[in-house]
Image: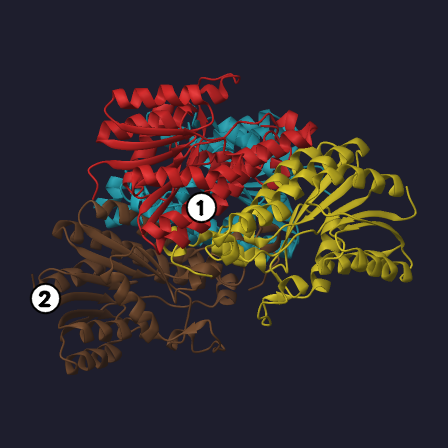
Chain colours: A red, B yellow, C cyan, D brown
């Protein structure tokens, strides 16, 4: 067993990923391989984690450039040797009205939040299966639980990811790998900076990070974060269709 | 009101689409605009429907060529004037093992069964909303209800479609449009020709067609076809994860 | 059709029954037959309803004296001619600790809230079935939805009633009779005078009465009152048993 | 620890109880205290279990004579010392049409299958709580899961029992006691001798006994037996009310 936790993070500059990386490093020494689109932020986060005692390598990756997935993962495996935890936190929050008005906006939203993630999962599943151990943790969204008029494009992409993770959970369990689907509700982060926030439903990235760290440790398969979103979504899923179709939330 | 039902079918050469078109023509005079990839089959089906008394126009469309969506739909609207029913039946049944082994196979499966459909829905939603009437019926699959180890790529694409339809149901209800998500179980068609079939769970395209015709008439929003798949999927969705992840069906 | 609503109320002195009777009288002229255990309160409520313009007859009935059920109902039918609405509001809120400690307390709680009600329902079902019209509305409780450590005796009795009503719904629907199961949450009434109250979960009898009047008018079969208890109980029913058995609410 | 399993069975002459007692004795030496209404059958079963090597005491008890509960249980505890397992299998299968026609038939059915059981549970809960160990297993029925037109009196009584058991599960878990609610479907026994039987839904008492023995060993809280009844009842509970009320099963 390695003396470090060996952790690969894709979308490492997201607020939730950054908070989770710090939380892991707080728990014990980590070696991180970080992938993200924004070189400058990536460098800042790498340096911060190094200052906290972690070993860190990084590489710029735009997950929409799917031909870069394989070389980026190869490099990650080379640096880390084997990988104990993969965390995928990449994603965007598309504007539903813009998507409704534009096929190309819709396509971009679906590719960023859905297609590119499933293609990454295809490669990662095979690499983890070959290792016969590890955890594959992916941030999807409560939005995937039921498509709503106000954000069904985002929801559709996230439903694709969650359904893929459900299938991978079974496939990879037979090889000793734990798949974790992380479903955050409202998180106060740069991604949601344009929304009016506050109130008890909003969580901080640090709170979400604690939930992710615990869920990985406990080898859970699906979590809602904060926990009460499980019950909010239970209710939303049970609203009769005749009423649901009149709601505009 | 038109003396014909004006019906646009995308993926018109699928066995379920063909059977449904015939069933509609049996109920009363129809004007069809048919879109499909295979020119030869498309012509055969057009001629068959004409022989049954329908007015038919058709055009070859590979839905993967998304830049062709807009002109194809424009032509359909031009021919039909307004559209009473849109039926999307396009799709493929990907080989899960091939998808697991190949990112490009996975991408093709996701694009054919998920991305391209949602992009079509984006255009169709706007066209139907402008009309302020019509039914938008889409064949998804029971496979989208829960991702299983044996076909999660197909399931992920279909979950994307169903989640999008759920959101469109609400958005378009406010404009007088009915959205229908059709979830077939096992259907004995060319798409499943390589599978061993028979037994009470398998239905014919003609049976599915009857269910679609009735559901459109009754302005339903979600149907399972045959009906008992609703209950099969209810059970599958309720199997505890600890057991579900060991199943290989 | 009668010029009056002809209404039989059993347990007429309960705060919810009283408020509902007033609400019905507000909607139009009513003829009430009131049954309750407490003669003095019964008279006060009768006079109040008469002062509001209703025709009222009453009779003292302790529902635990089950041999009195038949003559009391015979008298009610004689006075009212036919009965448009039956409301059963009889019941007590047993002390769970006392029930746990005493078989006779448990028996009293089960008889008052369960057995006696089902015996009344047996007679009422036959009388309404003979009429071929009418509504049979019964106040049960959210407590019957899942037995909790803190009040399972009360819950067990109410579950008996709700299960009986579920079966009667089907049996009597074939005869034109609507059965309504009314599930209140926390109601601020003399029955709960010993509990610390307040907060958004507590409703007044008048609020519950409005829900009952509306549900009878709409020929509903099951209501939670106030409405949000439906969702609270959905959550309570879905709490995993491993967690539920540790809860002490 | 005792060298015997010390087992108290109430309703010991039921076919399911007899088969379960034999199965327990097959697993290892047991000391039984058997209670039942029919003295002759009770003696026969006692002798059979003795012939199989068990130590057995028995006493005639009609559970409707509730004043006999306390002395009967006192005697059982005296014979067994402490009790490892309590199994309640007492009950009758009432005739729904007779119950609908007769208040006294309904009362008898409710008392035999509901009230008397909950009163027994009241005493047993306190005795087990004092011991701080043991399993309390009770045969209820799938009929309690949703009241149906064809047997709601039986269902109402069983719902009372299951709701009580749910509450006791939590109360007694804190004292080291495991409560088990056993929900059989159709069992081919003398109790169902008048029904036309056969087909895959019918189980033998021996099959049910195996499920009970396993569930007690695994410290389960709720089982359906045979297992597939869990899924049948899931479906029955999810049938929309508008359809359910037209069903006559």
Q: Which residue is mark 1?
A: A123
Secondary element type, mark 2:
helix
Question: What crowding class fits label 1: few (fewer than 14 Cα within 10 Å), some (14-19), or many (20 or more)?
Answer: some
Task: Say which mark, if any, is on residue D90.
Answer: none
> C214 or B53, which is in the foreground?
B53
Q: What chain is tagged by disc 1? A: A
Q: What chain is tagged by disc 2? A: D
> C81 or A242, which is in the foreground?
A242
Q: Which residue is mark 2?
A: D79
Secondary element type, mark 1:
helix
* Residue at 24 percent of width and 51 percent of height: D122
- In this rendering, the answer to whether D81 lies above or below A81 is below
Residue B214 position within the rendered picture, expressed as x and y whole percent measured from the top left: 74, 54
Residue C174 position within the rendered picture, expressed as x and y whole percent measured from the top left: 64, 57
> A202 or B187, which is in the foreground?
B187
- Do we see residue C13 in this rendering? no
- Looking at the image, residue B2 sits to the left or right of residue A69; the answer is right
* Residue at 35 percent of width and 60 percent of height: D223
- Looking at the image, residue B120 sits to the left or right of residue A150; the answer is right
- In this rendering, the answer to whether D99 lies above or below C74 is below
Question: What crowding class fits label 2: few (fewer than 14 Cα within 10 Å), some (14-19), or many (20 or more)?
Answer: some
- In this rendering, the answer to whether A194 lies above or below B127 is above
Residue B146 position within the rendered picture, expressed as x and y whole percent measured from the top left: 50, 50
Q: CA distance from mark 2 to mark 1?
A: 66 Å
- In this rendering, the answer to whether C141 lies above or below B29 is above
């Amino acid at each position: 067993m390695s003396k470090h936790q060996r952790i690969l993070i894709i979308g490492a500059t997201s607020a939730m990923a950054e908070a989770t990386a710090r939380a892991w490093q707080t728990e014990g020494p980590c070696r991180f391989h970080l992938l993200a689109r924004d070189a400058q932020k990536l460098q800042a986060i790498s340096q911060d984690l190094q200052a906290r005692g972690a070993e860190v390598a990084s590489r710029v990756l735009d997950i929409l450039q799917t031909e870069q997935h394989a070389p980026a993962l190869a490099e990650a495996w080379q640096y880390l040797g084997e990988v104990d935890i993969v965390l995928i936190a990449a994603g965007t929050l598309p504007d539903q009205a813009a998507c409704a008005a534009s096929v190309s906006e819709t396509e971009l939203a679906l590719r960023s939040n859905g297609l590119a993630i499933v293609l990454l999962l295809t490669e990662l599943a095979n690499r983890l299966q070959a290792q016969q151990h590890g955890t594959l943790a992916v941030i999807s969204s409560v939005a995937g639980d039921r498509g709503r008029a106000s954000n069904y494009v985002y929801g559709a992409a996230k439903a694709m990811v969650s359904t893929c993770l459900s299938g991978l959970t079974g496939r990879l369990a037979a090889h000793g790998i734990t798949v974790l689907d992380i479903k955050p509700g409202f998180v106060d982060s740069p991604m949601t900076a344009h929304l009016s926030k506050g109130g008890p439903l909003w969580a901080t990235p640090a709170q979400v990070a604690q939930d992710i760290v615990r869920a990985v440790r406990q080898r859970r398969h699906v979590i809602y974060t904060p926990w009460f979103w499980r019950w909010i979504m239970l209710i939303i899923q049970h609203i009769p269709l005749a009423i649901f179709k009149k709601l505009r939330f």
